[in-house]
Image (cartoon, helix red, strand yellow):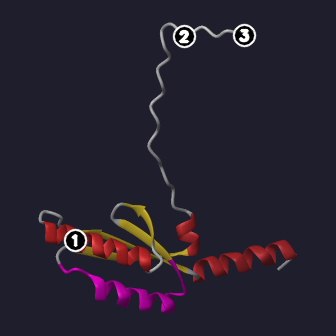
Amino acid sequence: MSNDRDRERFYFKCNALKYMWMMVMFDLPTDTAHERKQATKFRKFLLDAGFSMSQYSVYFRFTGTRENSQKYVKMVEDHNPGTGDVSILFFTDYQFGEIKHLYKKEQPKKLDEKPEQYTLF
C-alpha cells in the first residue's frame, strides 16, 4: 500500500465484503383469521429477533459474519408458519450499502385559486 488512505480503503473493502446482512422475504396467506394471526405472529417474531422492516413482507438484519447468520436462519426456520413462501437472501455489507431505495413521490399540493389575504399590521 502506498499510503495510509489506500490501506484504509483496502481494509474497508475487505470488511465490507466479509460482513453480512440477511434479508427475509415472505408471502403468507391471510384469507382466514387463523392465517392472519400466523402471519402477524411471524412478523412480530422477526421484529423481536432484531430484524427491521424494509417493506411489509421484507425484513433485514445485520448478522456480522456468514457463520453467525446460520443461527438466524435456524430461528426463521423454526418460526416459519409453513403456510406460504419464505425466502432468505444474504448480502455483503458492501452490496447492502449499494441498495437504492426509491420512495413514493408526494403529489404537489394545489394552490388555492384565490389565496387568503394576510393582514400585516
| Residue at 49% across, 92% down | 67
Q: Position of residue 56 (x, y in %)?
A: 35, 61
Which quarter of the rendering shows the C terminus?
A: top right
Q: Is residue 56 shown left or right of residue 13?
A: left
Dot 2 lies on which element? loop
Q: Quadrant of residue 45?
A: bottom left
- Rendered view: 25 above or below 65: above
Dot 1 lies on which element? helix
Judging by the rendered image, the residue that carries numbered circle 2 is 115
Which disc, if any, is residue 77? none
Which segment did they paint magenta? Answer: 62-82
| Residue at 78% across, 76% down | 8
Judging by the rendered image, the residue that carries numbered circle 1 is 37
Residue type at numbered disc 3: Leu
Mark 3 surroundings within 10 Å by alpha-carbon count, few (fewer than 14), some (14 through 19), many (20 or more): few
Residue type at numbered disc 1: Lys
